[in-house]
Image (cartoon, rainbow, N blue to C red):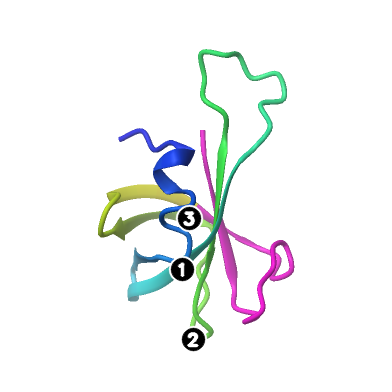
Amino acid sequence: MTILIQDIAPHHIGSAFTVHTQNGAMPLKLIEAVERPRRGLPTQFRAPISLVFSGTSEWQLAQDCYCVDHPVLGRVQWMLVPIAKHAVPNPDGLPLYEAILS
């Protein structure tokens, strides 16, 4: 499934996603979705999309590929990468994760 920025922002900002880990299901909340600059990427490829999620204070995810569920977008497999807690506005101070779709 190809996901475009208009499929996500602004409709799903703040919505809940569920990531499946070896330790069970973990909730994530989408807090940012932005299209990144193309930086010389040929026009036949779409512009990269950055999705930033906040996690929970109970546990942190390692960088890895995870199955992620969303009630509208369905089940996808994304590489989630921990990022700095101050990378985007994060008033709760929860762990942050980024997925880049290209």
Is 48 on the left or on the right of 15, as rendered? right
Identified at 51% across, 33% down, the residue is: 102
42 or 31, nearer to the observer? 31
68 falls in the magenta region: no
Query: What is the C-alpha distance between the residues marked 2 and 1?
Result: 14 Å
Q: Circle 2 is placed at which residue position?
A: 58
Identified at 72% across, 25% down, the residue is: 39
Q: Label 3 crowding class (10 Å Cα cut-off): few <14, some 14-19, many 20+?
A: few
Could you tell me if the residues under marks 2 and 1 are in contact, i.e. CB atoms within 8 Å? no
Front disc: 3 or 1 = 1
Span highlighted in magenta in the image: 80-102
Front disc: 2 or 3 = 2
Looking at the picture, which amino acid does disc 2 mark? Glu
**Up/down of 86 relative to 35, above or below:** below
**Up/down of 102 relative to 91, above or below:** above
Is 58 on the left or on the right of 85, as rendered? left
In the rendered image, residue 75, in percent from the top left (x then y), is placed at 27, 51
Q: Quadrant of residue 18?
A: bottom left
Is 79 on the left or on the right of 74, as rendered? right
Identified at 30% across, 49% down, the residue is: 73
Q: Label 2 crowding class (10 Å Cα cut-off): few <14, some 14-19, many 20+?
A: few
Dot 3 lies on which element? strand
Closer to the chain start, of discs 3 and 1, is 1
Q: Circle 1 is placed at which residue position?
A: 29
20 or 51, nearer to the observer? 51
Q: Circle 3 is placed at which residue position?
A: 64
Looking at the picture, which amino acid does disc 1 mark? Lys
Closer to the chain start, of discs 2 and 3, is 2
In the rendered image, residue 92, in percent from the top left (x then y), is placed at 62, 82
Q: Label 1 crowding class (10 Å Cα cut-off): few <14, some 14-19, many 20+?
A: some
